[in-house]
Amino acid sequence: MKKFFLIGVIISFFNSVSAQELGLRFGEMTGNNIAIDGVLNFKTSRLHTDISFGDGVGVDIIYDFIYSPISASSKMYYYVGIGVVTLFYSDFEMGATGEAGFEYRFDSIPIVIGLDYRPSIIVIGSTNFHWNGFGLNVRYAF
């Protein structure tokens, strides 16, 4: 019975996923400036993750609870979310981050380009507020 339940949960999860994206994010992140950028889209929300490099290795996991086109026929989307940010450097740091941004999806090629802003506050390892988290995202949509 547990196996059937688990299979049902997995099938439901993959039925709610509409697209996956993988690319790069350039810009200021907590201690880093370039990241492997991945997105798992759902119908009205998405999971946005980054693995960043620079001064250590950072991992950001953001749940964009608002992800919607600007108008019904638009290829321009806006998104807002919150999540967790970590940095593995000489010490371990962890905190919370927010995200707000816009992105454009091309019709003729499977490319997504976006601009976002991610302020974050670090509360474990040190106490810092990073306000300059602007970034450019370029991703391939599968």
Image (tube, rainbow, N blue to C red):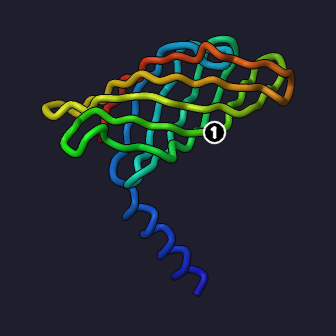
Where is residue 78 drawn, in percent x and y? 39, 35
Q: Looking at the picture, does residue 35 appear above or below residue 11?
A: above
User: Which residue occupies 58% across, 87% down?
Assistant: 1
Mark 1, Cα crowd under 10 Å, few <14 / some 14-19 / many 20+, is some
Q: Quadrant of residue 95?
A: top right
Left or right: residue 129 compared with residue 21: right
Where is residue 92 drawn, in percent x and y? 81, 26
Q: Looking at the picture, does residue 112 appear above or below residue 8?
A: above
Pointer 1 residue:
83
Q: Residue furthest left?
A: 108
Q: Residue furthest front?
A: 71
Left or right: residue 78 compared with residue 130: left
Q: Quadrant of residue 56?
A: top right
Between 57 and 85, the residue placed more toward the observer is 85
The kind of residue tagged 1 is Gly
Q: Looking at the picture, does residue 120 appear above or below residue 67?
A: above
User: Which residue occupies 52% across, 82% down?
Assistant: 4
Q: Looking at the picture, does residue 16 appear above or below residue 38?
A: below
